[in-house]
Image: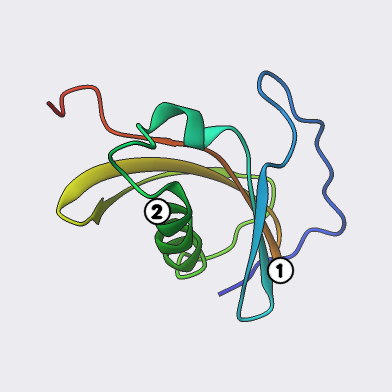
């Protein structure tokens, strides 16, 4: 499902920038600063990004909206937040382990 509203453009604030781009079935998924919230000595950040990118493309695209999603990675809970630019472009602004996860 894809709802279009013309071209949507936002300026990144806070962390800003794109640290990695993953293409999933013609959809561009850009990542922001999320990797800094995960301990790279214990978890493979690139693998987590792949899982998140594929999951994010399964959600209905509603341009210029934010979404908050919870998934599992190797049995661990991960929350990610994404912004839909348009039907072929998403940005994962951040991802992290929920605060109540120990």
Using the image, tell me which numbered label, if any, was put on residue 58. Answer: none
Q: Position of residue 59 (x, y in %)?
A: 46, 64
**What residue is rendered at 67% in x and 18% in y?**
14
Q: Position of residue 31 (x, y in %)?
A: 61, 46
Q: Quadrant of the N terminus?
A: bottom right
Q: Position of residue 52 (x, y in %)?
A: 43, 57
* Left or right, 81 with reference to 19: left
Using the image, tell me which numbered label, if any, was put on residue 88. Answer: 1
**What residue is rendered at 40% in x and 62% in y?**
51
The residue that label 2 is drawn on is 48
Q: Upstream in the sequence, badge 1 or badge 2?
A: 2
- Viewer-side residue, 10 vs 79: 79
Residue at the outermost top position: 14
- Viewer-side residue, 40 vs 60: 40
6 in relation to 44, above or below = below
- Viewer-side residue, 41 vs 97: 41
Q: Residues within 10 Å of mark 1 (few under 14, many from 20)?
A: some
**What residue is rendered at 66% in x and 50% in y?**
20
């Amino acid at each position: 499902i894809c709802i279009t509203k013309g071209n949507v453009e936002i300026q990144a604030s806070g962390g800003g920038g794109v640290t990695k781009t993953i293409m999933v079935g013609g959809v561009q998924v850009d990542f922001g600063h999320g990797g800094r919230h995960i301990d790279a000595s214990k978890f493979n950040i690139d693998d987590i990004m792949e899982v998140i990118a594929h999951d994010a493309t399964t959600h209905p695209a509603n341009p210029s909206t934010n979404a908050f999603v919870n998934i599992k990675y190797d049995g661990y809970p991960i929350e990610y937040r994404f912004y839909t630019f348009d039907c072929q472009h998403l940005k994962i602004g951040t991802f992290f382990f929920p605060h109540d996860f120990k």
